[in-house]
Image (cartoon, rainbow, N blue to C red):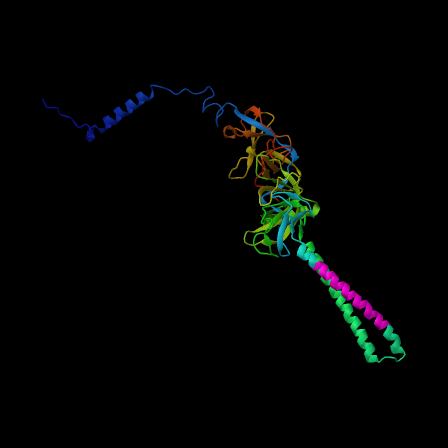
């Protein structure tokens, strides 16, 4: 048997085919109807929905928020000395250990003093000899002055005696200088700490021949640890603000050194450089820290925060601020539990705080979470009151954390 397929797409049958297709589509579409909420429209709480939107809120409040400039700084010693010998001799004694704290004047090294002690005795003996000759010359000048007055000796002879006495006076001064210099060389045999600090690696050993001012490795390097500097740079745009607030009083500087302990070390700004680095556009600043606990170590990097001022300002949690094409705005919950879209001006942020200068009043309630479901003029349902502004931010009232985007103006 042969099966024959009939082509139903003939133009004369096209209208009937379309009608049959539409009928089948209507029958399949009527099989199930989507269930809608009693309020109609989208799901509950959605934009355009009839139910209130669930939100978390917080209140705008006034608090002290420091005006801070953040930077990365390096710790450096106020005094650093590479100790070298000023004489040539044999190392006889090392009076310190590596990494030891020393005080100003403490003995560090001792070089064999015997050659210098002998030189001092010889210089003192020469001086005594010259002093005896000078005393005799002065006596002759006094005696010949009387004879010259009585014309018993010639003027030329008296003048020669006076010249010999003056020459001996000059030799006496020279011998005094020689004795002082020899005594100084003897003092150089005992090398002492020029200031209080901590010693580093030793560059010499007992028995070594130490040469005067020998280039290369120093006998030891001493770094002062307390007080200590932290050097850092800030953008040149902040220079005007730094100078303005510094003129009003001392600026506090907090530094957090690397490590698990995030408790800041407190110091004060003591130096502003007199030139801006043209290659980086920054200016160099230094802060001085007591560093009693030795948490700051020379060469260490640390996070620096310069507090220019601590004004009392109006704040809200920064999560409440939403961006838009027309500017930043927040949703304010009014007394009738409806939301109002409010344009605000954010001066700066600090940690979790946003400082508001326009658009809000103290005590107003703002939405900090759930903004996507909020429709202006529609009701909201407060699920939770969030933490007040600044909770958990460092630099607020007892918080932690670090702010970003500080504006120093």
Q: Nearer the viewer, residue 124 or 2?
A: 124
Q: Residue at x 47, y 21 (%)?
A: 39
Q: Is residue 400 left or right of residue 16?
A: right
Q: Is residue 13 above or below residue 164?
A: above
Q: Is most of the magenta stretch helix, strand or loop? A: helix
Query: Which of these two is toward me, 316 or 396?
Result: 396
**Residue 8 image offset from top left, x and y in percent:** 19, 27
- Quadrant occupied by the C terminus: top right
Does the image show residue 178? Answer: yes
Q: Quadrant of the N terminus?
A: top left
| Residue found at the very far right of the displayed protein | 150
Please give the name of the residue rendered at 79% of the width and 74% of the height, measured from the top-left corner.
163
Residue projecting furthest to the left = 1
- Quarter of the figure with residue 329: top right
Of residues 165 and 299, the one drawn nearer to the viewer in this rendering: 165
Q: Is residue 120 covered in magenta?
A: yes
- Which percent across, then down, holds residue 296? 61, 41
Does residue 176 appear anywhere in the picture? no
* x, y percent for residue 338: 56, 26
Image x and y of residue 332, in percent: 58, 30
- Residue 55, compared with residue 232, is above or below; it is above
Residue 390 in magenta?
A: no
Q: Is residue 339 above or below residue 311?
A: above
Instruction: Find residue 184 and report its image quarter.
Output: bottom right
Q: Is residue 357 left or right of residue 26?
A: right
Q: Please provide the residue range marked out in magenta.
A: 119-142
The quarter holding residue 36 reads top left
């Amino acid at each position: 048997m042969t099966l024959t397929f009939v082509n139903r797409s003939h133009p004369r049958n096209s209208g009937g085919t379309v009608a049959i297709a539409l009928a089948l589509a209507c029958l399949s579409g009527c099989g199930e109807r989507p269930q809608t909420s009693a309020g109609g429209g989208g799901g509950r709480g959605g934009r355009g929905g009839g139910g209130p939107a669930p939100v978390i809120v917080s209140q705008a409040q006034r608090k002290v928020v420091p005006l801070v400039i953040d930077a990365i700084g390096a710790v450096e010693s106020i005094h650093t000395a590479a100790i070298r010998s000023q004489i040539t001799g044999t190392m006889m004694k090392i009076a310190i250990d590596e990494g030891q704290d020393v005080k100003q004047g403490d003995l560090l090294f001792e070089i064999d003093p015997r050659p210098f002690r002998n030189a001092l005795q010889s210089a003192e003996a020469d001086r005594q000899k010259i002093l005896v000759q000078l005393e005799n010359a002065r006596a002759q000048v006094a005696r010949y002055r009387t004879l010259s007055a009585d014309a018993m000796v010639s003027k030329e002879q008296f003048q020669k005696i006076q010249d010999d006495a003056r020459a001996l006076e000059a030799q006496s001064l020279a011998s005094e200088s020689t004795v002082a210099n020899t005594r100084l060389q003897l003092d150089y045999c005992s090398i002492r700490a020029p200031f209080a600090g901590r010693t580093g690696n030793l560059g010499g050993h007992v028995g070594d021949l130490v040469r005067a001012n020998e280039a290369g490795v120093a006998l030891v390097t001493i770094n002062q640890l307390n007080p200590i500097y932290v050097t850092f740079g800030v953008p040149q745009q902040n220079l005007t603000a730094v100078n303005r607030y510094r003129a009003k009083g001392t600026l506090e500087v907090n530094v957090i050194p690397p490590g698990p302990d995030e408790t800041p070390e407190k110091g004060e700004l003591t130096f502003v450089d007199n030139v801006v680095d043209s290659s980086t556009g920054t200016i160099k600043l230094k802060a001085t820290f007591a560093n009693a606990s030795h948490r700051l170590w020379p060469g260490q990097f640390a996070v620096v925060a310069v507090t220019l001022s601590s004004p009392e300002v109006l704040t809200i949690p920064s999560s409440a601020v939403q961006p838009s094409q027309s500017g930043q705005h927040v949703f304010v919950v009014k007394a009738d539990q409806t939301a109002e879209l409010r344009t605000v001006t954010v001066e700066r942020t600090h940690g979790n705080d946003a400082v508001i200068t326009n658009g809000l009043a103290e005590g107003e309630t703002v939405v900090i979470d759930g903004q996507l479901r909020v429709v202006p003029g529609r009701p909201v349902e407060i699920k939770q009151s969030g933490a007040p502004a600044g909770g958990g931010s460092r630099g607020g009232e007892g918080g932690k954390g670090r702010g970003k985007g500080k504006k120093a103006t």
